Image (cartoon, grey):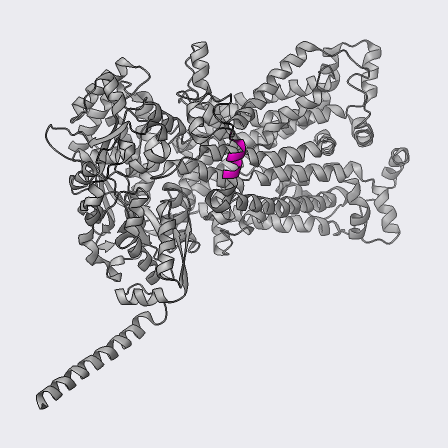
Amino acid sequence: MNKKHSTLRRVATAVASGVALTVALAACSSGGSTSADSGSASDITAALQKKSTITVWAWAPAVKDIAKSFEKKYPNVTVKVVNAGTGNDQYIKLQNAIKAGSGGPDVAQIEYYALPQFALGDSLADLSKFGMSDLESKYTTGTWNSVNLNGKLAALPQDSGPMALFYNKAVFDKFGIAVPTTWDEYIAAAKTLHAADPNAYITNDTGDAGFTTSMIWQAGGHPYKTSSDGKKVTIDLQDAGAKKYADMWSQLVDGGLVSPISSWSDEWYKGLADGSIATLAIGAWMPGNLETGVEAASGNWRVAPLPTYEAGSAATAENGGSGDSVMAASDNKLVAAGFVKYMNAQEGTKISMDAGGFPSTTADLSSSEFLDAAPEYFGGQQINKVLAQASKDVVKGWSYLPFQVYSNSIFGDTVGQAYADKANLNEGLKAWQKSTASYGNEQGFSVTSK
Amino acid sequence: MTTMSQAQPVARATRTPHKAKPDWSGWKFVGPFMVVFAFVLIAPVVYSIYLSLFKEQLIGGNQFVGFANYAQAFTDPKLWDALGRVTLFLIVQVPIMLTISLAAALALDSARLYLSSFFRIAIFLPYAVPAVVATLMWGFMYGTQFGLVRNINDWLGTHLAPLSSNWVLVSVGNINTWEFIGYNMLLFYAALRVIPADLYEAAELDGAGTFRVIRSIKLPALRPAIVIGVIFSIIGSFQLFNEPNILRSLAPNAISTYFTPNMYAYNLSFSGQQYNYSATIAIIVGVLTAVIAFIVQLTGSRKEA
Amino acid sequence: MANATITAPVRPLATARNRKIGAGMVRPKSIPLTVIMAILVIYSLLPLFWLFVGSTKTQGELLNSFGLWFSGPFSLFQNIGETLTYDDGVFVRWLLNTLLYVVVGAGGATFLALLGGYGLAKFNFPGKKAVFAVVLGAVAIPGTALAVPTFLMFSQMHLTNTPWAIILPSLISPFGLYLIWTYAQDAIPSELLEAARMDGAGEFRTFFTISWRLLTPGLITVLLFTLVATWNNYFLPLIMLSEPTWYPLTVGLNQWNQQAQTVGGQPIYNLVITGSLLTIIPIVVAFLFLQRYWQSGLAAGSVKA
């Protein structure tokens, strides 16, 4: 009896002091303010019970529904979802807000290639301080590497975009073209197609920075290296991988085998609908866009793995896809972090997927519900099997520049000219490298341009 | 009305002579305008000049650099490329646009048109269309795969490519011309309408034909309006931004980020976050525009005297 | 030319309706001239016709049919309905925003120009020449030169992302000031002001009871032009506003147009086109109704250079 009593007392004391400690810690860390730079899961939960409002800048259509569902779960929190522009347009506004010191959101959707630029300026809160580092196992390696920059967790992955080959089966069947598995076969198919129908092209390309960097990625190139302190940058857009890609793709551009329509224009949508653009080498998020924008071609499109340079190998790259970050200037970080977690690690992922987003979470990517989906638009093909496999085949070790957004903005001025003149793309890459390097030096980085 | 015109010569004779004591009452009226003006125009210009003397880097922070930005600008090939382009645009587009507007105004004024009121409104309508909408419309029509240009190419067997590097400036010029022909036409037409009838009567008596009348009466009367039209068009050309910027997504390789000086300044600020250099470019272009406009104004008024 | 400036103010007002035509007598109408002008009219109206035709098509039809003729089910009213309700009726919000900017911005600009122009025309005050130089110089400054510093200034004052960021800059219309100044010089006889002063009326009283009425055509001209400018204002709102709540129609339409360029985005070109049509109509109506005013207003402005 004595022993039990003392054990009980000991346990009671332990519990009591534990509670006291927790209360003390809670009082210290949150201090009634939700703008703390760090917090545990319980801090976040506590903050979500209080009345507050956060602003989210995102253009992905699913975010509004996620916000509504979040508000149901946490009735005291109001989430304002604002479409402040897509991609680059939003980044301009984010940069303006950061420079002005006000007017920015609490949460922002930022594509993977742009994250380093924002992370550099310490504009993004480090989510590892909110205990989110242990979410690593939930995500694919590719996406996790894209959000884990310089030891800080800059965002939680929202979706991913491993590249695959989307092709119009009806067009291929009409001209007796087999689905290419290597780039040489792809080029041959381009020639056959265009010869048979001068109005049709294997794909369109007027030059796209994201496409080019992804293709260099797939070819094994590592053109961008940044030192861990973020101040030294090496650019080599003529390394083995870059040259391999440029030599290959130049055959298509110089040979007039790609349609001169710009992606995302209304002519592009038309071309996809009537078959004059026969394939797209693009990220796995494309099905949603095809389903809403190219309804006329329903049933014609299929998905295949991205062609590679060597027969029998499997390699691809990420093309697009974004994460969601908490802004460092936010004065409501706990709630913002809670929302980001909800959106990308909890119930929000299902809502995204239902809206056509391609997940970055491994559980979803391997769930049978996901893999067995056989959308009518793709003629009943189980496209997610192909796309999920693609996400496993992403080449490792890629990184973007700390000023990639700017670099991409001058792509048209440099590589674009090679397209316009039908010159070899390597020349364009050299020009791009030169302009990018001089910008980097202007901005105080020490850039080594190989 | 008649009393006024009779009284006017008298009024001029007895008008308040210039007093030695300064009269500040005019400031009551001009004041409000100038206060807002100082806030929204003068303050930013001053701030702009201040910005142009500094340099802020992503790594390294903000530093005073004196005139280094200006020195850089003077040897910047992109700036000169842009300036050259808008000058070319100016030399070609402005005369074409103003000539068409002039011809249209003269035609309207000749009263030899059927449905002249309809024409007046119809030609003026494009001015009411926002540049965004105008560029979107023309952008859709310029499409060589599915747009109107494709149809024209099919019918006439031509190979027009309005959005190619060689033609894109012409295409932008077309949009600009389309937008402003009506406005300039009305500027001229309004000037023509106030020509006193006795001048025409005198010409009739002298037996002058239509073209003589145009040359001797209408054109001289139009000179001030033409000068204004030219000045505004020059300023507009140097400030060209909206149309090429919106068209850029359709022609990313033909329209560079430094296609016009304004676009260069804009992209420097908002893509590159190089606010200081952007301010420098803007000041240089602003000064250049002002100088040229001033010269035109002087030339125009001197001829008048 | 001196004669013209004295007699000019009397004639436009009197003869707007009963002016003798052309060279003083009625000339025979010319068909060839009409045909040539008709070509210009077709050029002016073609894109607008395309816009109208486009707004009657569904999104799918737009991408599949010839641009200049109707195709598929007539969906104009559906498109209008969808435009007004899409995204929780944000278009209506944008419309109300634009109305706000126009009423306060254009109204305010007209008021300031009215006061300022009157002051410049009818008073000699110290600093008058400086005011001229500064204001005229301001016209030459590219908008983009001011955009960034204005943005930075406004963000320090927490004005960005508010309607004030749009309204304040739009209150300055150098063209309006100039127009009222030239108009007031001729339309308001100095002895009228002398008489009022001798009666002991204060300057503002004189202005608000007598003077401004004489400036009506000029006033309406300025109002219309500032109306068009604020209605079509695009660049500054684009920079100042980060959230769609305060967008004017132009910026909103541009965002809709960009919407197709996104992951999972839906192209809504039919709404962009219908929205553009709806955006243009109010301005067109305004111009149609106030025709005679702005024509005589422009007349006076163009005579004095």
Lateral position of residue C293 relative to residue B268, left or right: right
Residue at (73%, 46%) from the top-left corner?
C119
Residue at position x 54%, y 28% from top?
C52
Rendered position, C177 above or below A255: below
Q: How many marks?
A: 0
Left or right: A195 in relation to C179: left
Residue A239, visible in the rendered structure: no
Location of residue B207 in the rendering, given as x and y in whole percent from the top left corner: 81, 8
What's drawn in magenta, residue-wise?
A: C75-82
Residue A371 covered by magenta stretch: no
Q: Residue furthest bottom?
A: A2
**Is B234 placed above or below B275 here?**
above
- From the top left corner, tell me how far across and down residue B128 is, in percent: 60, 32
Task: Determine if residue C301 is in view.
Answer: yes
Quadrant where the C terminus of chain C lies? top right
C218 over B117 or under it: above or below: below
Query: Which image quadrant: the N terminus of chain C?
Result: top right
**A290 relative position to C292: left or right:** left
Q: Position of residue A153 (x, y in %)?
A: 24, 54
Between residues A159 and A249, which one lies in front from this camera angle? A159
Q: Quadrant of residue A238?
A: top left
Residue C81 magenta-highlighted: yes
Q: Is residue A286 left or right of residue C98?
A: left
Q: Main secondary structure of the magenta part?
A: helix
Residue C63: image location, x then y, percent? 42, 26
